[in-house]
Image (cartoon, rainbow, N blue to C red):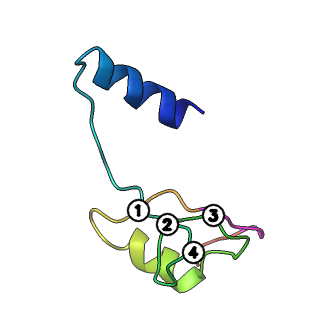
Amino acid sequence: MLEYKIPTYAKIFNIPFFEKDIGVEFFEEDGKPLNAKPREIDKDYIVGELHKKDGWRAFHPCYKVWRDK
């Protein structure tokens, strides 16, 4: 549970830390790079993000071997 422990201690001890929305999807149906549901990330979404200069570079879950060809 480090995702809770580290920010909590940082706040307690006034240690600045970087916050970023990693786009985890729990209930929304819009595209997100990390998906807590057992629904594979759509290939078109991945390809679109990889072609963006500042797009996402980590995607989960992917159940099959995936190549952008």
Query: Which residue lies at the image location 28% right of the left edge and 14% below the top edge?
Result: 13
Given the image, on which type of amino acid does mark 2 rest? Pro
Please give the label number shown on residue 56: 1
Identify the residue position indicated by label 4 in the image.
68
Given the image, on which type of amino acid does mark 3 rest? Ala
Query: Which residue lies at the image location 22% right of the left edge and 25% below the top edge?
Result: 16
Please give the label number shown on residue 36: 3
Of discs 3 and 4, which sits in the foreground?
Answer: 3
Query: Which residue lies at the image location 49% right of the left edge and 79% below the top edge?
Result: 28
Q: Residue 3 versus residue 47: which sits nearer the camera?
A: 3
* CA distance separating discs 3 and 1: 16 Å
Quick one: SS at disc 2? loop
Label 2 crowd (10 A; few <14 / some 14-19 / many >=20): many
Identify the residue position indicated by label 2 in the image.
33
Query: Which region of the structure is painted magenta?
Result: 60-65
Of discs 3 and 1, which sits in the foreground?
Answer: 3
